[in-house]
Every structure is written in C-alpha cells, then in structure tokens.
Image: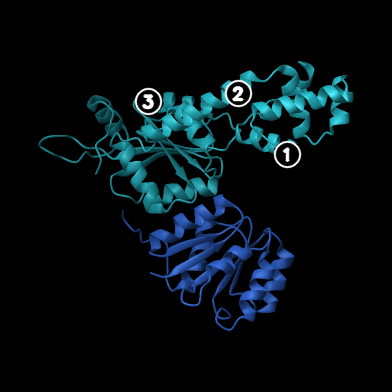
Chain colours: A cyan, B blue
Amino acid sequence: MSSVGAPLYEAVDSGARLGWTPTIDPQITVYPIRILIIDDLRAVADAVEAVLSRQPGMVVVGNVASMTDNSARVAADIVILEFRHGDEFAADALRAILQAGPTAKLIFLTSDEGDQVILAAIDAGASAVVYLSSTTIEMIQTIRAVADGGSLISPRTISTLLSGRRKSEALRDSLTRRETAVLSLMSSGTSNRNIAAKLGISYVTVRCHVRSLSVKLAAHSQLEVLVRAQQLELLDHDASTMVDCA
Amino acid sequence: MSTILVVDDDADTRFMLRLLLEPAGHEVVEAGDGEAALNFIKPNSLPAVITTDLCMPILNGEGLIARLRSEPRTASIPIVVVTASPDAARALEASDLVDAVVIKPFDPHVLADRILALAGTTSTVTPQRV
C-alpha cells in the first residue's frame, strides 16, 4: 500500500469526509491512493474505474468526462487524464491539478506513442504517460510508482526531447516568412507555378525559395523537404496565416 | 492462462477490453486489422477466443472470419463479432460462422462476459490483484 503524498491533516480530513478508515500503523497513517479519472470516452473510463477500484490501496474518487463536471472537484492524489493530440490538454491538465489539490500528480492516458505526447506531458507537469497499449499490470504499477513520488519520464528523455524541440524551434526561426509560406503551400500539394501565382511572385523566385529550404533542412528533393519539415513539426501553423504574412 | 485476440482498429476499444479481460486471468493480444490478426496466429499459439470488429482497414472482419473458418487449424476458434450494423449481425448469426454477435453501442461488461464465457471463464467479477 502506498502512502499518500498529501499532508496528513488534509488526508485525515478528506478521508474522514469520505468515510474511509485509515490503516492503523504505529509509525504512519496510510490512506488509499485517491484517483480521479477524466476521460470523455465513458466506456474506457468505466473500465479503468472497474479495474482500479478493485485494487488494494486504491480508491476512485471521481470519474468524469471533463473538468467542467462539478463532481471533478474532489481531492485526489492521482489524476488520470485522457490525452488526445490537439486537445486543450495544458488547460485541462492545469485545471485538473488545481482542482484535485496541490499535491495531486498527473498521469496522461493516450493512444499516441509519439514524442509530442511526452513533450505535452512534460509541459503539463505530468509524472507519467500510460499508453493504451499498456497492460493492466503496467497501468497499476505506474499509478503506484507515481503515488510513491516517482516520475516515469526519465530526466534523460526529458533532456533529449527538449533539446530536439529547441533545435526544431531554432530551425523554424531561421526560415523567412516567404519560405514559410512556400513550405505551407508545398505541404498542401500546390505546384510551384500555382505557389508563384498565389503569392504573386515569379516561378523562378519560388524555385529559389525551395532551394533555400532544401539547404536549411538538409534535404535533397522537394519531397524530402516536406518529410523533414514534417519531422521537425514545421507544418503545424495555420496555412492561411503563413500566406498572409508573406 | 489462455490468450484472447482482440481485433479492432480503435485503440480505445482494445484498451477497454484488455482492462476487462486481463483481470480474469487471460493474456490479451491486440491487432488493429484482420491481416495483423492473421499474422499473430501461429501454428503453436492459437488464441482461445477471437473478438473482432467488422469495419477495419486492410482486411475487414468478414474477410478475417472467412480466412479463419477456411483453415482447419483455426476453423474451430470461437469468434465474437462486434458490429454497428444490425443487418450484418443478423446475417452473421444466420451464417453460423461466429459464436456470438454484439451490436454497438454495447455494454462493455456484457461483451467481456460473452468473451469470457467462450474462453471458459464465467465472470469478470473476480479481480486479479496486482
């Protein structure tokens, strides 16, 4: 059984309110790990609750579709937040942590096994990421480890990913507005002649920008430019904005 | 411990079934389409039960079922089908090719219990403590 990270007086208070009886120990008072599940896919959330509520030393104190649900306002030690790329995850995560209490720890639940999820988790201050491909045992062990104060995102991973993001940001900053606009139109499948027409520049100038992009992205073809840009996440911006700012 | 093969292109559904089936003591193996499911099935590692969606990329559920039933070594593996189409459900039930059909939206526990019954486990109620 894991000890709760919250100060003892808070744990006693919320434990008594919810009718839990603490394990009597001459040295410490131990309460179950209080878990709040936030997932708009109710069938998945219910399955997670069904498993966790049967584990010794764990209690599910909330199971909600979103943080706007008033029942999410419950003290918790662990918040399991389903993450989908493109969600307003940071805002949701922040709300989840604030509402669950200052000592709550966040675990992302996601099907996306890409680096962006780890970066999002780091940004949100999450302690671990549980993938939907994980086994039940792995999920439970992760929750216990995080409740015990561990972080399952290693400092090395954090360092590597942040370093990669800095490089990507530096490269993005090195592109001119016109190169960015050309890149955006290339990514939508626009031909060089149509790019020239759309941007009101000559075909030769477009070729010039494409060559410059190739050099900056260390690519040997237009296709490779797009692949590198995708890898470096340079194509996330709104295309219309890019064209307008050209 | 027997193995249950969950075939569905939706990761959420696979995860949900894993959570419901693993505590009953089964190993759950996942495949995102019918072709991946066939690749998993080796001569010496037949799953106790296969649950499959119908609408999937590469090789859909009907294709998977046809391939499984045409092979002597996989012909008798119990199959549970999950489908959103009542017409497809009726056709499959009439065909006698599958052992159970569950129509979406479904109660996950009902589906899990159908699968577990075919795997020789009666209920998901008994938890495996970790």
Work out how far the residue at label 3 is from the one at label 1, CA to CA, in angstroms.
49 Å
Work out how far the residue at label 1 is from the one at label 2, CA to CA, in angstroms.
18 Å
Q: Residues within 10 Å of mark 3 (few under 14, many from 20)?
A: some
Residue A140 lies, in percent from the top left, at 36, 47
Kind of element beneath mark 1: helix
- In the image, what residue type sits under mark 1? Leu
Question: Is disc 2 on the same chain as disc 1?
Answer: yes
Which image quarter: residue A149?
top left
Q: Are marks 2 and 3 in contact (CB under 8 Å)?
A: no
> At 68% across and 64% down in the image, what residue appears?
B60
Q: Are marks 3 and 1 in contact (CB under 8 Å)?
A: no
Which image quarter: residue B58?
bottom right
- In the image, what residue type sits under mark 2? Leu
Q: Quadrant of the N terminus of chain B?
A: bottom left
Kind of element beneath mark 2: helix
Foreground residue, B66 or A74?
B66
**Is residue B6 shown above or below A111?**
below
Q: What mark, if any, has residue A171 been given in the picture?
A: 2
Q: Residue furthest bottom?
A: B72
Horizontally, residue B95 falls left or right of residue A151, namely right
Label 3 is found on which chain of the structure?
A: A
Quickly name the residue at label 3: A101
Work out how far the residue at label 2 is from the one at label 3, CA to CA, in angstroms.
39 Å
Residue B79 lies, in percent from the top left, at 57, 72
Quickly name the residue at label 1: A223
For residue A197, say whether it is visible. yes
Horizontally, residue B94 falls left or right of residue B106, namely right
> At 52% across and 43% down in the image, what residue appears?
A113
Nearer the observer: mark 3 or 1; the answer is: 1
Horizontally, residue A116 falls left or right of residue A175, namely left
- In the image, what residue type sits under mark 3? Gly
